[in-house]
Amino acid sequence: MVLGVAKLICRICGAEYPPTLRNVCDKCLGAVDVIYEEPHENLKNLLSTRTARGVWRYKELLPITREEHIVDIGAGGSPLTRAEELGKRIGIRKLLIKNDTINPSFSFKDRPSSVAVSKAREFNLPAVGCASTGNLASATSAHASAANIPCIVLMPDTVELPKIRQASMYGSHIILVDGTYDDTNRLAYLLTERARIGIVNVNLRPYYVEGSKTMMFEIVEQLGWRAPENIIIPMASGALLGALHKALRELEGFNVLDDINTAFHGVQPVGCAPISDAYARNAEEVTPVRTPNTIVKSLAIGSPGDGEYALGIVRKTGGTCQAISDKDVIEAVHLLCQTTGIYAEPGGAITIAAAKKMREEGILDEGDEVVCCVTGAGYKADEFIEPRGKTYAVKPKISEVLQTLSAELPILASA
Ligand SMILES: Cc1ncc(COP(=O)(O)O)c(C=O)c1O
Ligand SMILES: [Zn+2]
């Protein structure tokens, strides 16, 4: 048995509900969140002796009641890497990268999908699905295929082709919508009203977001049971930022950490930055972007479901919101790749661009500790990224290889 969910609680009015298939409060339509009973054993002791890595290492703080329902294809357990050279280049001495490109379907979305598809099993739902800007499509599909549950994914038809192909590889039913992500999301809602299907980021949302907390649990353990000073997080719906904050609140609530002072910084691309725009205008409300216009397609959500929630966390923790141009995101993909060996997609590398900008603007100091969440891998979103390494075509002759390279690499000139 895994520790059970205590209940669902409304984020707005505090109304409580049993842990059933619901995502909003009946009284005020606010989002509902999972809250847990205090574990019987001291959580830090429990985790310190555990050998399992990945999302399910933290099963006491995940909303699954029976272990046999868990769908585990190895999500999570990603490295937190000190980026010395990159840090030098951008002027931040303690720059750390949470490298979530290494997940089974190559983005952090495997974390929430693992939990949501497990919960779908627990609810005995005959099918699952999602509305996606690209990465969730593959993450949900991968877990559904491992659980042998049919999967329907809805995506805008502008999503990068490799992401569509990848989701299809797992055998999902792919619906490409001639419209924005918001149109796609609306269709996903309507599907849940018409059929008994668990859409991971709609009616399974309270359970789904719990999976993302594990990224922060790992960071805290990797820092030696300490919360980071600054964390920079890409935002689309704002759900990841909210989940990472919830993770710290739970560790505090269960006496694993105290005195948490982490500043949460959220980043969006300039062409779709409803949350960062609200931050810049000092507004309480997030104004939707009707037609996103950015190459950072994975973050192109014009009407972010958790936008105001994320904005509140940023302000409360003394963080900031940033908006980054497509040009600067592309530069960051190259810089990250060439200084750390991590090949990220634009939606992942955007946090590096944000760290650089924040340092230039004096928001971050040289001595600040900064964790950048790099949330997705480059292979499936590289249509706007031109490789910069040189490529040469040669005949199969060593003399030609040496001659070609000798001008560039003196070590070969005398070979
Ligand atoms: C690579 C990547 N990073 C970050 C996010 C942000 O996720 P959220 O919608 O939770 O804000 C997404 C969302 O699709 C994504 O694909
Ligand atoms: Zn309510």
Image: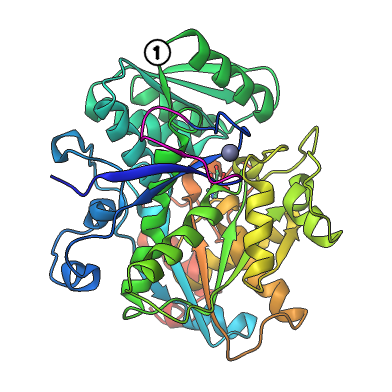
Identify the magenta region. Answer: 13-22
Other-residue count near label 1 (Cα within 10 Å), few / some / many at <14 / 14–19 / ≥20? few
Q: Please, is residue 337 above or below residue 363 in the view?
A: above
Residue drawn at (21%, 38%), measured in percent from left and top? Answer: 70
* Quarter where residue 61 is shown: bottom left
* Quarter where residue 73 is shown: top left
* Front residue (pair 297, 265): 265
- Whole-percent x, y for residue 68 in the image: 13, 35
Q: Is residue 197 visible?
A: yes
Q: Quadrant of the C terminus?
A: bottom left
Task: Name the residue at the right extreme.
Answer: 281
- Drawn side of residue 306 relative to residue 83, left or right: right
Q: Is residue 184 magenta?
A: no
Residue drawn at (51%, 55%), measured in percent from left and top? Answer: 344
Residue drawn at (57%, 14%), measured in percent from left and top? Answer: 190
Mark 1: which secondary structure?
Answer: loop
Q: Please, is residue 92 above or below residue 405 in the view?
A: below
User: As shown in the figure, which amino acid type bears the numbered disc 1?
Assistant: Arg
- Whole-percent x, y for residue 256 in the image: 32, 74
The rendered magenta stretch, by its main secondary structure, is classed as loop
Q: What residue did someone put label 1 on? A: 196
* Quarter where residue 16 is shown: top left
- Drawn side of residue 7 relative to residue 39, left or right: right
Q: Please, is residue 91 above or below residue 156 in the view?
A: below
- Whole-percent x, y for residue 158 in the image: 65, 28
Q: Quadrant of the N terminus?
A: top left
- Drawn side of residue 277 relative to residue 410, left or right: right
- Whole-percent x, y for residue 124 in the image: 26, 20
